[in-house]
Amino acid sequence: MTGFYVIMLCVLCGLVSAGIVKNTYQLITAQEIDFNLEYEKGVNFWTRLLVYVFAGPLIIMKNAIELRRSYNAASIWMLLSAFIFLGWSFIIGLTVIGILLATF
């Protein structure tokens, strides 16, 4: 049962990290975040790419919920988005916990 708790700790840590990054980005830029790198160049491109790496799970779930509400998409897409969301959050959480343990 402790393995389950470790996995849930990593998922929750990744979710909190994604929320902090997403909301900080929105506070600084005053615009909604989405997966659009069309007009970005140089430092802006790499900065937004780093933000996408950490805020990606929340962007995916936001897009999946909007798709479900507006187009009445199939439930399987919501389920697949949830699996991607959980997996990505787990990896981010594992990375953040690893960095914190290595630092302190």
Image (spheres, rainbow, N blue to C red):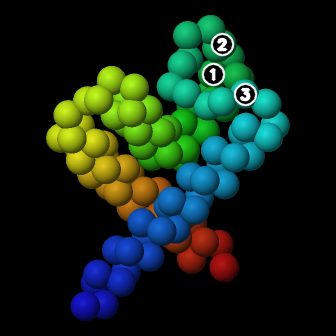
Specify few, some or many for label 1: CA neighbours under 10 Å numbering under 14, 14-19, or 20 or more. some
Q: Quadrant of residue 51?
A: top right
* SS under mark 3: loop
Distance of label 2 from label 1 (alpha carbons)? 5 Å
Circle 1 residue = 45
| Circle 3: residue type | Gln
Distance of label 3 from label 1 (alpha carbons)? 16 Å
Task: Single out the residue that lies furthest toward the top.
Answer: 39
Q: Is residue 89 left or right of residue 1?
A: right
Circle 2 residue = 41
Q: Quadrant of residue 75?
A: top left
- In the image, what residue occupies the spot 34% across and 74% down? 7
Q: Is residue 27 above or below residue 31?
A: below
Specify few, some or many for label 3: CA neighbours under 10 Å numbering under 14, 14-19, or 20 or more. few
Q: Is residue 10 above or below residue 83?
A: below
| Circle 2: residue type | Lys
* SS under mark 1: helix
Asked if the residue at tag 1 contacts the one at tag 3, i.e. Cβ–Cβ closer than 8 Å, the answer is no
Q: Is residue 71 left or right of residue 13?
A: left
- In the image, what residue occupies the spot 81% across and 37% down? 28
Asked if the residue at tag 1 contacts the one at tag 2, i.e. Cβ–Cβ closer than 8 Å, the answer is yes
Could you say which disc has been placed on residue 31 in the image?
3
Judged by depth in the image, the label closer to the viewer, 3 or 2, is: 3
| Circle 1: residue type | Phe
